[in-house]
Each structure stands twice: as structure tokens, then as C-alpha cells.
Image (cartoon, helix red, strand yellow):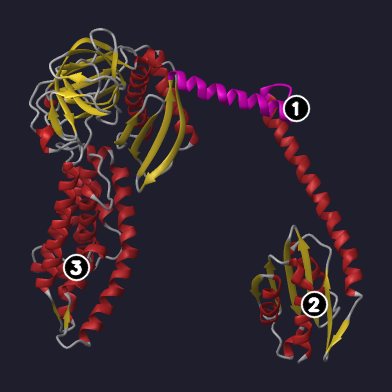
């Protein structure tokens, strides 16, 4: 509060009720957003990000009430950090990142605010001309929802103008929005197999993490068309077993696939997906080959190659997360991931693109940890003990009484329920394939491991061999020098061609400019030139300007099935009231085009070169009228 006082001209806390409220709002809001950003949240248009955005904007609006102009909230981050350092050192540790996020959001809001203030002025003018002198509830809500204006600000502005605001209408719009949000949450919660049939399944199902095959899995539940049945003999079914080695999709890791056999060794079904049921059983979505029956035992066999790919990708994701935090800073948080057998995708918080050096350093660090052959350790414990062990938790994940901590030496420690390698050296190799933006303050890395990484690098090596052969380099180390030499030769050749073209165009200009016609009181040079498009026509026009060849120049050219025309006028033609832009608009439609320009020069392109001669004639006819 004292730091905010220093940013105002003469406002003081505790003197004026409204000012005191504004100071409190700013202090509470900057503390809240500093903590949240340190924990990995970022401003956005939905969810927790929307709350953050609203908090920052409300603080900025209250800063304006105190006479503070522009972005200021970010300057209070170190004040928050220092006050709370003993309890929450993360703010000072991540000070630069938090300041950057808040400042960017504030500056974005300033442009929105300017638009909103203009709109508010329009609403006030509209209300002044209305019978009831009232800003409608719908308009007031739009100011709140779209531009971040609290109702109080709209109300005060209206009151200052002698107007009212329809508070009941505003409250009705707010209630409608809350109902839409409630329904949206309900729709989300109803997804992920949250139907009544599945919710009524109470049978226990144990996930056997460390095996690829379960020879005696008892089928305890069968769901077909949202109904529990004792037997399924159609095309598709959803199955629950008392125990299963199949991993159900969660935490970014996609599901296992595989086969189901009966005790006679016959293939009865193919597992195409596995999801979590409401009561946390693993739901196997299968394509049936033979009938299956409740109470019978089956052999569940994973697609081993797929599981191995998933283990490699998932463990590499943990190493990548730790490497990013080490290279970019502790403020870097995971914002989402996809663990696929063929590649991994990792989203993380960052305001700027990573540099080539940073990407190389991260990649080298991950591979270093792979080659160190670190044993992967898993521990089942409480969330509290897990945090004491230094395990990272996702900001928006929910954890039960027991959590699984996955540790890779002292380099990586995270809460995770996925499948992992036993030792980092099983990953083999890690290669980043791309880094890109996926939203405000969020970046994405895609990478491959193991066999897929080898295939990626082998393809690159083949491409390099092809390039070496194409540029006739004696060895790979000489490729760049060879390309530089070829580019230099090409540049020299292009300059020679340009010089020759100028000489050729000059010769053509001599022929064209000798043919001067009379159109009314004006002299005209009008011709179809044998040149390569608009650039050459412009060059001829520049040559015409410097030589006083005629009062009007009309040149056309056909190149690669396209038509081009340029028209230029000297001062005498301009004094007659002619304008090149008007003339080109007469000509262009005749050769299927359009264009424009200044009074003394205009150009156009079209699709019908056959119309160029008629277009030239039309221009000359128009000039003759003057």
C-alpha cells in the first residue's frame, strides 16, 4: 500500500473511503496474482487464467481511480516478494518472470481499456438521448465481460453524467452467464465415461503396472450400448477385469493397446482404448472377434512395442521438464503434455521463444542424464511427504491420500502415475524436433526418443548425404562453404542478368519512344512492349520520365499468360485534367484486371492479355476527348 501511495500524486491510505478501498484492492490483487503465477498459472480467456486476467484488470482500474496512468502493478511484485520472502520465497526467485507476465497483461489491457472508455462514452451519449436516461443492463454487462469494467465503474461514470444503470438487467445477465458456466462444467464432468451405468460399477480392478501379460484376468463387468450384460457377441463392448496390465489414459500418457485371448489361446478381442471409469476401474474398449462372458478368465496381452515407446517417451518428458527448469529458470512450469509411443509433446510456461542455444543445451542435458544410466525410483507416499521429497506437482491436478513419486536421481522428482523405464539409459537417445508457441505465455516442445529418434536422425543424415552430392561437396564439413560459394555465384549471375536486361530494355525503349502519336492536343507513346512484366514496364516508365519523350505514356506487356499495363502523365497532361488512376480504371477491365495509382502514374494487372490492344485504344480515345 505504501509503495502504491508513492506512485500517486497525493493519494493516501486511510484518508478517503473510496481511495482506501482502491489501495486495498490493489494490494490484495497483486499478492494473489504474484503467488498464482509463481505456481504456474497464466492469464488467459478461461478457467483460472480468466480469474487472473480479471484480478490484474481490476487492480489496474483501481490504479486509474488513484490517478496512476499506464502499467504499474508489475512494479509491486518485488514488494510482495520481500514482504512474503520467509513464507513464500518463490516470488523473489521468479521475480523477473512474474513481472514480465503482469506487465504484458497490463499493456494488453491498456488498449482494451481505451476501446472500452470510448464505448462507455458512446453508451453515456446513447442514454442521455433515451427517455429513461438509463444504461441498459445488457450494455453494462458487456462493459464488464468484454472490457473488464466493474459494474461500479460504469455506475459511477453514469452517475457523474446524471444517468442511471439498469442494475436488475445487469444482475440477470450475470446470472445467465453463471448458468452457462455451470452447464459447461456439467458437460465437462459428464464426459470421460461419467454415465449412470458406469457410475454403478463398484467391482474392484487392480492395475498391474510392471507386467506385459496377465494370464488369469477375470471378466467382472461387460457394458454394451450403456447397459450391463452377462455376455457380448456383437462388434464392440466395454470390459472391466479384476486385474489388468493395460494402462488407462491419464496425465498426458495415452492408453495401452493389445489383445485378449481365452484360456484355449484363441483371440477373442482387440483392445483399442482404455479409459478410467468414474470409480477408477480401467475400462477396456474392445473390438470383439469371439463372444465374451462375464465371470470367465481371459489372457490380457499388451502391445509390448507400444508400451515400450510410451515408457521411453514418458520418462523423457520428466527429464525434459527438469532440464527446462534448469536452463530457463525455476519459473518454468509444465502446462500440459502428450505421451505417445511415437513422440512426446510438452507444453510449458514461457514468455519468449527459446533460442537455438537454449534448445541445444536442454537437449544435451537430457541426453547426458540418459547416458548417466540413472536408476528410476518410484515411491508410494502421501502428497505432503512427496512435497518434502521435492517432487513437482501439476498446478491443476488433484491428488488423493496416496501419490506415486517418480525420481531420477537428484535431477528429476515428480508426482506421476504413468509408466516409466527402470533406468534412464533404456531411453537410448532424445531429440527435439520442434519448439513453437501454443498461446499467450505458453510454448511447446515436440521430441522423439529411442527407435524414433534414430529414424529421425537417420533421415536427416540421408538428407545431408543428398545435399552433399547435389552441391558436389567433398565431405559434409564442406557443405556450408560450398552453398555459400554457390549463393555468391548466383548473386553475381543475377547482377549480370540485371545489367543485361537494362541494356536490352534501353534498346527496346529507343524503338518504342520513337513512335510518338498525337491524341488531341497531347503527344502519346502507346505500345505493347516485349518485356518481362511490371518491373520492366516501371523501368521503361522511369526512362520515359527523364527524357521528355511525350505527354502521355501507355505501355502494356504480356508475361506467362498475365497482362500488365502502366500509364504515366507529364505536367501538360495533368493540367488538362487527366489522371492516370482514372485512365487505368477504364483500361483494366478490358484485359480482365484491376489497378490504381497516383494522378501522374498508375498500373494494373489482369488475366486476359488478348484485351491489351483494345485497352490501349480505349485509353487513347479517352485522351483524345480532352
Instruction: First in sequence, mark 3 or 2: give its number.
Output: 3
Q: Quadrant of residue 536?
A: bottom right
Q: Is residue 109 left or right of residue 576?
A: left
Quadrant for the C terminus, please.
bottom right
Question: Residue at point 21% right, 56% down?
Answer: 54
Front-most of 72 and 425?
Answer: 425
What residue is shown with label 3?
141
Can you tell which mark lies on residue 209? none
Image mark count: 3
Q: Position of residue 290 (x, y in %)?
A: 27, 19
Q: CA distance from mark 2 to mark 1?
A: 50 Å
Residue 472, disc: 1
Question: Where does the image place residue 310, in percent across and percent down from the top left?
Answer: 34, 22
Secondary element at tag 1: loop
Q: Is residue 42 located in the magenta-colored stretch of the structure?
A: no
Q: Main secondary structure of the magenta part?
A: helix
> Residue 344 or 539: which is nearer the viewer?
344
Q: Which residues are magenta?
A: 450-477
Disc 3 to disc 2: CB gap under 8 Å: no
Quadrant hosting residue 378: top left
Name the residue beneath numbered marker 2: 553
Q: Give neighbour class at mark 1: few <14, some 14-19, many 20+ (Cα, 10 Å).
A: few
Residue 564 figure quarter: bottom right
Q: Earlier in the sequence, mark 1 or mark 3?
A: 3
The Cα atoms of the two marked residues, 3 and 2, are separated by 61 Å
Amino acid at each position: 500500500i505504501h509503495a502504491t501511495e508513492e506512485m500517486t500524486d497525493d493519494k493516501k491510505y486511510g484518508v478517503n473511503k473510496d481511495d482506501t478501498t482502491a489501495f486495498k484492492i490493489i494490494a490484495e490483487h497483486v499478492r494473489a496474482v504474484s503467488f498464482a503465477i509463481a505456481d504456474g498459472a497464466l492469464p488467459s480467456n478461461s478457467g483460472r487464467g480468466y480469474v487472473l486476467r480479471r484480478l490484474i484488470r481490476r487492480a489496474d482500474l483501481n490504479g486509474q481511480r488513484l490517478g496512476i496512468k499506464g502499467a504499474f502493478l508489475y512494479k509491486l511484485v518485488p514488494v510482495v516478494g520481500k514482504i512474503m520472502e520467509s513464507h513464500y520465497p518463490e516470488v523473489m526467485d521468479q521475480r523477473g518472470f512474474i513481472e514480465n507476465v503482469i506487465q504484458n497483461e497490463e499493456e494488453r489491457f491498456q488498449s482494451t481499456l481505451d476501446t472500452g472508455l470510448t464505448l462507455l462514452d458512446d453508451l453515456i451519449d446513447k442514454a442521455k438521448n433515451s427517455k429513461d436516461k438509463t444504461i441498459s443492463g445488457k450494455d453494462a454487462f458487456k462493459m464488464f465481460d468484454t472490457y473488464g469494467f466493474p459494474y461500479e465503474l460504469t455506475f459511477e461514470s453514469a452517475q457523474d453524467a446524471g444517468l442511471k444503470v439498469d442494475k436488475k438487467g445487469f444482475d440477470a445477465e450475470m446470472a445467465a452467464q453463471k448458468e452457462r458456466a455451470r452447464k459447461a462444467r456439467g458437460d465437462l464432468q459428464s464426459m470421460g465415461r461419467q454415465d449412470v451405468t458406469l457410475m454403478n460399477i463398484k467391482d474392484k480392478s487392480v492395475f498391474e503396472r510392471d507386467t506385459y501379460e496377465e494370464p488369469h484376468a477375470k471378466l467382472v463387468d461387460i457394458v454394451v450400448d450403456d447397459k450391463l450384460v452377462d455376455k457380448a457377441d456383437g462388434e464392440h463392448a466395454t470390459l472391466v477385469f479384476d486385474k489388468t496390465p493395460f494402462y488407462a489414459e491419464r496425465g498426458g500418457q495415452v492408453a495401452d493397446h493389445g489383445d485378449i485371448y481365452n484360456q484355449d489361446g484363441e483371440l477373442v478381442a482387440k483392445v483399442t482404448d482404455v479409459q478410467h471409469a468414474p470409480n477408477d476401474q480401467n475400462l477396456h474398449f474392445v473390438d470383439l472377434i469371439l463372444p465374451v462372458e462375464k465371470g470367465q478368465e481371459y489372457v490380457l496381452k499388451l502391445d509390448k512395442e507400444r508400451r515400450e515407446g510410451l515408457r521411453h517417451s514418458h520418462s523423457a518428458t520428466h527429464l525434459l521438464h527438469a532440464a527446462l527448469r534448469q536452463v530457463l529458470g525455476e519459473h518454468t512450469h509444465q502446462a500440459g503434455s502428450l505421451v505417445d509411443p511415437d513422440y512426446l509433446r510438452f507444453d510449458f510456461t514461457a514468455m519468449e521463444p527459446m533460442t537455438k542455444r537454449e534448445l541445444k543445451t536442454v537437449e544435451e542435458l537430457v541426453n547426458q542424464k540418459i547416458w548417466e544410466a540413472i536408476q528410476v525410483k518410484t515411491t508410494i507416499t502421501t502428497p505432503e511427504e512427496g512435497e518434502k521429497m521435492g517432487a513437482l506437482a501439476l498446478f491443476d491436478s488433484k491428488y488423493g491420500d496416496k501419490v506415486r513419486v517418480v525420481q531420477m536421481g537428484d535431477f528429476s522428482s515428480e508426482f506421476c502415475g504413468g509408466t516409466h523405464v527402470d533406468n534412464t539409459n533404456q531411453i537410448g537417445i532424445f531429440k527435439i524436433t520442434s519448439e513453437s508457441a501454443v498461446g499467450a505465455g505458453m510454448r511447446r516442445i515436440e521430441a522423439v526418443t529411442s527407435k524414433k529418434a534414430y529414424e529421425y536422425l537417420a533421415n536427416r543424415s540421408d538428407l545431408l548425404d543428398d545435399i552433399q552430392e547435389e552441391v558436389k561437396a567433398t565431405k559434409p564439413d564442406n557443405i556450408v562453404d560450398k552453398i555459400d560459394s554457390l549463393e555468391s555465384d548466383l548473386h553475381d549471375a543475377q547482377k549480370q542478368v540485371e545489367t543485361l536486361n537494362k541494356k536490352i530494355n534501353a534498346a527496346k525503349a529507343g524503338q518504342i519512344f520513337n513512335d510518338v502519336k498525337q491524341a488531341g492536343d497531347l503527344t502519346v507513346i502507346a505500345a505493347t512492349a516485349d518485356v518481362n512484366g511490371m518491373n520492366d514496364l516501371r523501368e521503361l516508365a522511369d526512362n520515359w520520365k527523364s527524357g521528355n519523350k511525350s505527354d502521355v505514356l501507355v505501355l502494356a506487356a504480356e508475361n506467362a499468360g498475365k497482362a500488365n499495363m502502366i500509364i504515366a502523365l507529364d505536367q501538360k497532361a495533368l493540367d488538362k485534367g487527366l489522371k492516370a488512376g482514372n485512365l487505368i480504371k477504364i483500361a483494366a477491365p478490358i484485359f480482365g484486371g484491376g489497378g490504381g495509382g497516383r494522378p501522374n502514374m498508375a498500373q494494373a494487372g489482369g488475366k486476359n492479355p488478348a484485351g491489351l490492344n483494345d485497352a490501349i485504344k480505349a485509353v487513347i480515345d479517352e485522351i483524345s476527348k480532352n
